[in-house]
Image (cartoon, coloured by chain):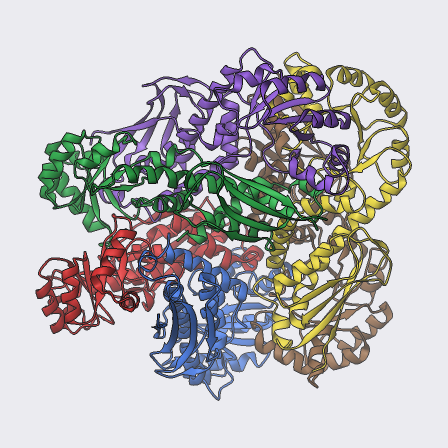
Chain colours: A red, B blue, C brown, D yellow, E purple, F green
Amino acid sequence: MVPRRELAQIVARALEEDLGRGDVTTDALVPATLGGRAIILAKENGVLAGAAVLAETFNQVDPTIEVTALQVDGQPVIVGATIALAHGPAGSILKGERVALNLLQRMSGIATATRRYVEAVAGTRAIIVDTRKTTPGLRALEKYAVRVGGGQNHRTNLSDGVLIKDNHLAAIRNEGHGIAEAIRRARAYAPHTIRVEIEVTTLDEVDEAIAARPDIILLDNMKPALMAEAVRRIGGRALVEASGGIRLESVRAAANSGVDLISVGALTHSVPALDISLELQLDRG
Amino acid sequence: MVPRRELAQIVARALEEDLGRGDVTTDALVPATLGGRAIILAKENGVLAGAAVLAETFNQVDPTIEVTALQVDGQPVIVGATIALAHGPAGSILKGERVALNLLQRMSGIATATRRYVEAVAGTRAIIVDTRKTTPGLRALEKYAVRVGGGQNHRTNLSDGVLIKDNHLAAIRNEGHGIAEAIRRARAYAPHTIRVEIEVTTLDEVDEAIAARPDIILLDNMKPALMAEAVRRIGGRALVEASGGIRLESVRAAANSGVDLISVGALTHSVPALDISLELQLDRG
Amino acid sequence: MVPRRELAQIVARALEEDLGRGDVTTDALVPATLGGRAIILAKENGVLAGAAVLAETFNQVDPTIEVTALQVDGQPVIVGATIALAHGPAGSILKGERVALNLLQRMSGIATATRRYVEAVAGTRAIIVDTRKTTPGLRALEKYAVRVGGGQNHRTNLSDGVLIKDNHLAAIRNEGHGIAEAIRRARAYAPHTIRVEIEVTTLDEVDEAIAARPDIILLDNMKPALMAEAVRRIGGRALVEASGGIRLESVRAAANSGVDLISVGALTHSVPALDISLELQLDRG
Amino acid sequence: MVPRRELAQIVARALEEDLGRGDVTTDALVPATLGGRAIILAKENGVLAGAAVLAETFNQVDPTIEVTALQVDGQPVIVGATIALAHGPAGSILKGERVALNLLQRMSGIATATRRYVEAVAGTRAIIVDTRKTTPGLRALEKYAVRVGGGQNHRTNLSDGVLIKDNHLAAIRNEGHGIAEAIRRARAYAPHTIRVEIEVTTLDEVDEAIAARPDIILLDNMKPALMAEAVRRIGGRALVEASGGIRLESVRAAANSGVDLISVGALTHSVPALDISLELQLDRG
Amino acid sequence: MVPRRELAQIVARALEEDLGRGDVTTDALVPATLGGRAIILAKENGVLAGAAVLAETFNQVDPTIEVTALQVDGQPVIVGATIALAHGPAGSILKGERVALNLLQRMSGIATATRRYVEAVAGTRAIIVDTRKTTPGLRALEKYAVRVGGGQNHRTNLSDGVLIKDNHLAAIRNEGHGIAEAIRRARAYAPHTIRVEIEVTTLDEVDEAIAARPDIILLDNMKPALMAEAVRRIGGRALVEASGGIRLESVRAAANSGVDLISVGALTHSVPALDISLELQLDRG
Amino acid sequence: MVPRRELAQIVARALEEDLGRGDVTTDALVPATLGGRAIILAKENGVLAGAAVLAETFNQVDPTIEVTALQVDGQPVIVGATIALAHGPAGSILKGERVALNLLQRMSGIATATRRYVEAVAGTRAIIVDTRKTTPGLRALEKYAVRVGGGQNHRTNLSDGVLIKDNHLAAIRNEGHGIAEAIRRARAYAPHTIRVEIEVTTLDEVDEAIAARPDIILLDNMKPALMAEAVRRIGGRALVEASGGIRLESVRAAANSGVDLISVGALTHSVPALDISLELQLDRG
C-alpha cells in the first residue's frame, strides 16, 4: 500500500515549491469555469508505480477534479497506454500537472529498474533489496516503488535494523574486542524485535561472524566465487546478503552464488525517470 | 551562493528521515568519546556542487564536528581527489554520512551533467537552462547545481515567469482569440517585473507571436533547420528558447541554429549521482 | 483570484492567535445547539476585497456554518449594504467574528485606497502599483487587495524581479564600474524570465541607464517636471516607473509626466481599515 | 519586555515572505566580502517601539551583523535622530532592510498613537487599553507596542478574560435568564484566575449588572454624560471600562466621566506607520 | 467542550509517533477489503472522559470508519459497559487502536480521580482545581478531563493568571518592598482582565496580604487549623485557595477549613490510567 | 543516550504550552538583571532519568543559564540529594522550572519503577521490556527512561517489529489459513531486518507456532505454570516473551517460568512521578 501520510506531505511540499505565489499564466488566461479532460499516457515501456500520486496531487490543488486510474501499480505499461484520466477545471489540472508527473515518473522509473533486476535473478533464491541511497525527502515513496517492482526493502532508517559496518567494528577492535562482542552489545542495546546484521569483507571475517551468531551476514564487495564459498561456510545459520556496486550486468552472477539477498543502491540513486505525459482536452465552451 | 535557508530545511528533513528514532548500531557500539577524521573523496571525475552540504549536515547532527572544505563548488574534481575533511566524534560522523553523501552526490551529478552540455555548445550564443522537471522538494538545490555547472535558471516556479503553453493558448482560442490577446492579458495580470514567454510549434505561430511582441519565444520540439528559420524571422525582437527532448547528442545542432537559450529537462530528472565516498579514520584511544 | 493557500494559512494562524485555549465566554454561555444568522454590513463607503475571508474563517471554526456572499470583490459598497450572510451555530459565529472582520476590513481598506489612486490618474497612461511595504505575514492578501482595487502588483519578493537600487549601484561603482556593468551582471545571474529594473535619481543617470538597456527605469523621488523630461529621453526604450513618497494629492501630477507606472507604499503601510460590522440574530429556541 | 518567541517567529515568517528564493539583485551585484554600516534614522517625531526587531531580523539573515541600539523602546525620537547602527556584510544588511523597517515602523506607529491618547487623558484616572482589533499574526508585537506607548493591555485572546457581550446576553435571555445568571455561569466555567466583565449599553443594564457583581463593567458606546452617571451608580463596586468608536478628539471627554479604562480599537487597526529609514555606507574596498 | 484544535493536533502527533513508516504487520496480513466492528469496553469502574478521542483518532487513520459513542463524557462507567462502537476496515481500526486507548484511558483516569476528590469534599464550599503539573503536550486535554470529573481549572499557563510565589516575593523584598508593592506592580503590568493571586505561608503573611487587597490568597502547605484561622482573618475579602501535597486522604480536612478552592497536583502528575479495552469482530468474508 | 532531537522538540512544545504569551508574574516582578542559583533536589528515593532535560529546558528559555549536573542518569538518588545546579537570571529560571520538573519527575518515575521490576527478576534470565502504552508525544523519552532503569525496549512503533496478534491471526484464519501462512506473509512483506513475533494464548497455538518458525513467541496472559510448559516445548527455537497484566507482585513468578522477556505496560501508563523540587536562591543585589 502507498504510504498515504508521507505521500500527502510530499505532494503538499512539492506543490508549494512549484506554485510559489500562484500560477500567473494560468490565472491570467484560463477562465475558472473552463473544464477539461486530462489523459495521462505512457511514452515508454515500464512498470507503473505511484498511480495514487495523481489523485493526491490534483485533489490537493482542487478537490473537484475527478481522477480515474486505468492501471494499477505494478502493472507493465507500454508506449501509448492510458494510465489514468482526470476531469475538472482546466486551470486546476494545469497547476498540478508538473508535480504529478515529476513524482509519477520517478516512482515508475524505480519500479521499472527494480523489475529488471528481479527478472535478471529469476530462478535463483536471491531477493533484490534497496539501500538508504534514496532521494532526500522521498524515501518512503521510493521504497514503496521498489516493492512495486518486485523488490523487498532493507531497513528504512538507522533505527529499524542493526547493521554493523567496518567503522563500527573498527571502534570495537580499538577496544581490543571483535565481532562477537560487537554483536553482543548490539543485542543488549537494540529492541529485541530487530535483527542484527554484520558486514564482512573476507572469508576470515565470515568465519569470525558465524561463530558470533548474527541474524544476517552482509558480504561487502566480494567476487561471486568468494560469495559462493561464504554461503557454503555459513550453511544456513544466517541470512546472507550481497552488496557493493552490483549493477544489472553483474547481478545474475551474484545471485548464482546462492546468497539470500542482493542490495542495489542504483535502484534509487541514479535511476532515469519513466517518460509519462499529460494531454489536456478542453471542454467545448 | 547556495540557498542557505532551503539547504538547512532539506538537511533537517533528510536527517529526520534517515535517523528515525536514532542510529541504534552506532549508539550501541561507538563510544561517545571516540573521535575520528573523515575524508570525503571523489571516486569519479566530475564537477563539485554542494560543498556546503557537508558542514550543514554534520553540524546539524553535532555542532562540535569541524568541516574543512578543500574544494569549492564549480571546481572539476578527479578520481581520488579529497573534497573535504571532517573531524569530531566518530559516532556523529557516521550518523550524518549517508545524508551528506546522498545530497552531495546528486548535486554534483547535476553540475557535472550541466557542464557537459555547456561545453557541447561552447562557441555558440546558446545558454543552457534548466526546467521545472526537478526532484520534488529539492528544487532550490538542484537549480543551484545547474548554475554551478555553468547553466542558467529558467523560472523556478509558476509565479516568477509567464510561459504561455499550448493549453493556455487553446483556452484563449476557445474564446475566439489568439496569441496577441493571450499576451495582452498576461501583461495586464502579471507583475510588470516578469517577462512574458510564449511557446510555438510552427513557423506560422512564430509569425503570429512576433506580431504580438512577447519578451521570449519558445520553439517547442522543432528540428534544427526550422529553429534556424524561426531565429531568422524573429530577428532579435525577442529572446529565443529551444526546448523539447534535447539531449547531449543533439544539443550542439540546436545551438547552431542561433537560439539564445536551450532548456534541458534531463539535467535534473534523470541524472546519475556522482560517486563520492567517505572514509573514516578513528583516533587512537 | 484570492490566493487560497495563503488565505487558509493566514486565517488558521489568526484563529490560533485569537482563540488561545478557547473562547471561555462563549463556551460558558452559548449552548452548542443554538443557531444564529450573521449579517455582515458595510458601515462606510468603499471597495470590497476579501469576501472569501468570511467562508474561510467561519468554516475553519466550524464546517457547518453556511456563508452566502452577496457582494463580490471589487464591487463598491455603500453604508448599510449587506456584504454577506452566515448561518450556523451562534457560538461558532461569535468565535470567528473578530478574525473575519479584522482581515476583511484591512483588505477592503487597501482596495478602497487603491481605487482612489486609480481614479485620480484616470485618463493618463499610468498604472498604480504597490511596493514591498506590506504587513509582515499578510503580503499575499494585501497584494491581492491592490489588484482588486484596480492596481497592479510590483514584484512580490526579492526573487521575482531585479531592482538595482542606489546601494547596489554603489557596490558596483566601488569596483570602478557603472550602470552598464550592473545590468550585465544581473542579466547573467537572474533567470531570463524576470526583468531588470534600475533606480535613477538624476537625468545624468537616466542617460547612463538608457545606454545600458534595462527593461524598466525607476525614477526615484523626482519632481514631475524632471519625470517628464526623463520620459522624453527614454522615449519608449524602457518602461518608466515613478516612486517616492507619492500620495493621493500628488499622484495626478506624477501621472501627467507620462510615466508608465507609479508605485505607492502608502497603499499598504498606512491604510485605515474599512468599517464593516457583523450583526447576529439568534434563532428562536 | 518584547515577547522574544513571537518576535523570532514573526521575523522568520516575514523574511521567508520577502526573500522568496533569495535576493537576486543583491546576490548578483554585491560581493559577499563587501562590508557596510547601516544607520537607522527617524524621519518623523514619535515614540520608538521594537528596537529589538533590528537585531532579530539582521541576525536571522546573517549572524555576523552587529547591531547597536542607540535608543530604547518608549523613548521619544525626533526627526533625524539615529535609532541604531548595524555593521556587517552589506549584502546581508540589504536583505534584511525591508522586513526590519516594516515591523519597526508599524510598532513605533502604534506606540506613537498610544502616547497621544495617554497624554490626552493625563490627570484623569483613565488608563488607555487596546482591543482585539489587531493585525492578524502580529498581535503579540502590537500589544507590546501599546504598553511601550503607555497603554495597558486588554485580554489578548478569547481565553484569558471573560467578556459577556450583547450576543452572549441575548443567548441567556433567550432561555429566560439575565445578567446574574450569565455571570454565575461564566464564573462556574472559567478558571478562577480570570475576571468576569460584562458589556452594557443602558443605565438599566448598569443597574442589573451592579446587582450581579461582575469584576468589570464595560460601557458600550455611551455618551460622556451617561458614562458619568454609570460611574456614579457603580460606585467603585466594579472596574468601569468605556468603549466604542473613541478617537483622539473624544477621548478626554470620556476620561472626564471617571471611568477606569478606555479601550481604543484605532490604536492598532488603522494606525499609520512611523517613518523610519535605513542609510547604508559601504566600507572602502 | 473538548478542545477540538488541540485534540486534533495531539492525535496527529501520537499517530505519527505510533505508526512510524506504517503498520507492517497489519499491512502484511489484513486485506484492505476486510471489515470489522470494534467494541470499546470499560474494564474498570470510573468516569469517562475523552469519548471524542475515538472518532478523532479513527477518522484521522481512515475517514471511512464510523464511530458511535454510547456513553458521554462525565458519565460513570462500570466494568463491562460498552463505551462506543466503531465500524470500518479492520486494518484501519487496528492501526488506531493503541493511540485511541492510550489517550482515552489517561483522560478517564484523570476524570475518575477528580471525581473522587470532588466527592470527598461534598457539602463544603471547596472547589477542586488542577495545577500546571500536567503531562507536557497534553495539558489542554488533561485540564478538560478535570472539568469532566467535576473540578475547575486553575490558570492554564503563565500568562492567564498572576500568581505571586515565594521567589517573586523574595525578589521584591530584595528591593526593600513587600506584598503591597508586588501586587501593585503586577496590577500595573498585567491585563486588567486577569486576577492577582498571592501565595502565603504564615499568618503574618496572610495579614500583610489582606492589607494589599489581592483577588486570591493561596495558603501554601498549611495545616487545616492554620487554614481555618487564615480563612477567618481574610473574611471574604479575597478568594482563598489551599495548596501543597493534598491527597485524597487529607482533602476533606482541608475543605473543612472553609477555603474556596483546593488545588491538587496529583490529579494529573501521578494518576493511573483507567482500564479500557477494544475488542474487534471481523466481518464474515 | 538521550534522544536529543525528540528532547528538544518536546521541551519546545512544553514551553510554548506553559508560557503562553509570557510569564506575566515574573515579567512584572523580577528584574531582568537579578541573578539566582537553583538547586534541584530529590524529595524521594529513586532512579534519576532525564538529567539532560534541565539544560535543554533552561537553555531554551535563556541560553545564558548555566546548568551543572551532579548526578547522572541511572544513578540511585536519595531524599535530599542535589541532582543539579543552575545559575543565571532568576526570572528565566522561574520560567523554565515547571516544564523541567514535569519532565524530569515523569522520566525518573519510570526509571524508578523499571528498576524495581528488574530487581524483582534478578537471577532469572528474564529481561524487562516496555510496551506501546506510553504517553502520547513522549514515547522517545519514556522508552529511554526504561533503558535507564535497566529494562530493554520492545518495538517503538508499528513499523519496526512484526507482532502478529489475535486479530491479525483471525483475519488469516478467515481465509482458511493459520499461523504458518501468517508468518510467511509477514516475512515476505516486511524488511528482512526486523523480526517476526507471534502472540499465542494456548499450548496448541504454541505448538502450531513452533512449527512455523517465528523469531519470537509471545505468551499472552498465561499462568506461570503454562508459561513454563510453553518454554519447555519451544526449547530455544524462538525467543519467548510473557505479557498481559503483569505487575510487580507477579513478575517474579513469571520470570521463574524461564521466559526470555517480560513486557510490562504499567512501566509507562500508570507510573507515579518521582518527587523532585527546585529551590531558588537569589543573588544579593
Q: Nearer the viewer, residue F73 or D159?
A: F73
Left or right: B183 in relation to B265? right
Q: Residue furthest bottom?
A: B123
Where does residue D215 sit, x and y in percent of width and height? 73, 24
Where does residue C44 sit, x and y in percent of width and height? 78, 38
Left or right: B8 in relation to D244? left
> Which quadrant is home to the C terminus of chain C?
top right
The residue located at (68%, 66%) in the rendering is D66
Where does residue C98 sit, x and y in percent of width and height? 67, 36
Left or right: C36 in relation to E44? right
Q: Is residue D164 visible?
A: no
**Count of all numbered marks drawn on residues in the image:** 0
Q: Is residue B198 above or below residue F260?
A: below
Where does residue B140 sit, x and y in percent of width and height? 50, 66
The residue located at (27%, 40%) in the rendering is E32
Q: Nearer the viewer, residue D184 or F175?
A: D184
Q: Is residue B19 above or below residue F202?
A: below
Q: Is residue C197 visible?
A: yes
Q: Nearer the viewer, residue B198 or F133?
A: F133
The residue located at (26%, 64%) in the rendering is A113
